[in-house]
Image (cartoon, helix red, strand yellow):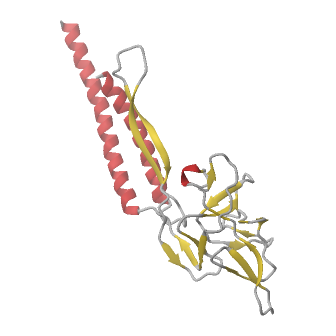
Amino acid sequence: MDRLIYTAMSGARYTLERQATLAQNLANASTNGYRADTVAFRAVPIDAQAPGTRVFAVETTTGSDFTPGPMQSTGRNLDVAVQGAGWITVQGSDGNEAYTRAGALQVGPDGTLQLPNGLPVQGDGGPLVAPDGAELEIAADGTISAKSPGAKNLTAVGRLKLVNPDTADLVKGGDGLFRTRSGDPADADPTVRVTGGSLEASNVNPIDAMVGMIDAARQFEMQTKMLTNAEQNDQKAATLLSSA
């Protein structure tokens, strides 16, 4: 009974967390470049003086699913999708480098190339600035060329900093951007390629997420019933002992 209480209690707690993770994934099923969050659990006996009957369910691994999402053609010059492994570098709100697969780029009021949320996109030498009124094109290697009004030729104005750190060294922040565990900037990788006029969709499978939420709800219901059964068994045992 003792083991039942602890197992059901901790299981119910982490089932709620799994439900929250699945809900977060489902809410971002249409977010470009989104990487689904993953979570797993394991049973761990409590280290105590009493006999080892108390077992907790604890979170054993959390991370992200780095499976690429499907490509969607947009025809827009400033939309880019990373081909295969790799990341686009941006400057996070904390001023440090962060990495994303969301390539819906735009030119800000000050001429800097940025994400829709205003975070500046980083080039090999820092933030990228587009000439006023210029038409931009992005090559497969991330080189950005500009064609000013009235000009005939394109002029290179910078290059996207494309990186490809080991995914085991990446952690997702609350802003949805990835950073290295050490916080150090990743080195540029000249082998990373992008596709212009396209965006990478979220890698969340809405059907799998919904099925997972239903499964988590049933698990939570089962665990709460186990707690109720444990309480009823305890009451019955107390009654038998008192009448003995």
Q: Quadrant of residue 58?
A: top left
Q: Nearer the viewer, residue 172 or 240?
A: 172
Quarter of the image with the C terminus is top left
Q: Position of residue 27 (x, y in %)?
A: 49, 59
Q: Position of residue 19 (x, y in %)?
A: 42, 48
**Residue pictured at 36% horizontal, 23% vertical:** 54
- Number of numbered tags placed on the structure image: 0
- The extreme front residue here reads 191
Left or right: 34 with respect to 233? right
Q: Nearer the viewer, residue 3 or 153?
A: 153
Vertical comparison of 168 with 121: above or below: above
Q: Nearer the viewer, residue 152 or 224?
A: 152
- The extreme top residue here reads 244
**Residue pictured at 44% horizontal, 52% vertical:** 22
**Residue pictured at 28% horizontal, 35% vertical:** 225
Q: Quadrant of residue 97?
A: bottom right
Quarter of the image with the N terminus is top left
**Residue pictured at 25% horizontal, 14% vertical:** 238
Left or right: 220 with respect to 204? left
Q: Position of residue 106 (x, y in %)?
A: 69, 73
Vertical comparison of 211 with 157: above or below: above
Q: Nearer the viewer, residue 64 or 188?
A: 188
Vertical comparison of 193 with 233: above or below: below
